[in-house]
Amino acid sequence: MILDKKKMSKSVKGIISLIFAIGLLYFFFGGGMEKQVANDMQKIENQVALDSERQYEIAKKKREYNGCLCACRTCCGGLPAG
């Protein structure tokens, strides 16, 4: 009877380990990691845009906005000059 419990315990551990290994393989090779990275990058880009808008509004209120006239608009965070 004790031997049967040990065999069953090993079987359960083996099955759980196999399921865990398959999950890891899917995450790293099945696209799960790429999806997570894409979501994180989108959050970062959104936060940068919000921060740029806040900084623009602060500078506008203080009348310290330098009116960047670059054609690419990247140095101003995508905001128009003015």
Image: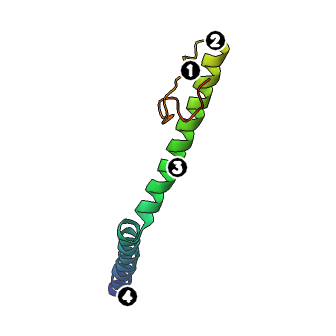
Question: For this view, does 53 lie left or right of residue 11?
Answer: right
**Mark 3 vs mark 1: in front:** 1
- Residue denoted by label 2: 62
Mark carried by residue 67 = 1
- Counting residues from the start of the chain, the first of labels 2 and 3 encountered is 3
Q: Position of residue 23 (x, y in %)?
A: 41, 71
Assess disc 3: are there few (<14), some (14-19) or many (≥20) residues with their C-alpha within 10 Å of its C-alpha: few
Q: Is residue 50 above or below residue 58?
A: below
- CB of mark 1 within 8 Å of CB of mark 2? no
Amino acid type of the residue that numbered disc 3 sits on in the rendered structure: Gln
Mark 2 Cα-neighbour bin, 10 Å: few <14, some 14–19, many ≥20: few
Q: Which of pointers 4 and 1 indicates the residue nearer the eye?
A: 1
Q: CA distance from mark 4 to mark 2?
A: 81 Å
> Of label 3 and label 1, which has the lower sequence position?
3
Q: Secondary structure at mark 4?
A: loop
Which quadrant, please, contains the N terminus?
bottom left
As measured in the structure, the alpha-carbon distance from the residue carrying label 4 to the one carrying label 1 is 83 Å
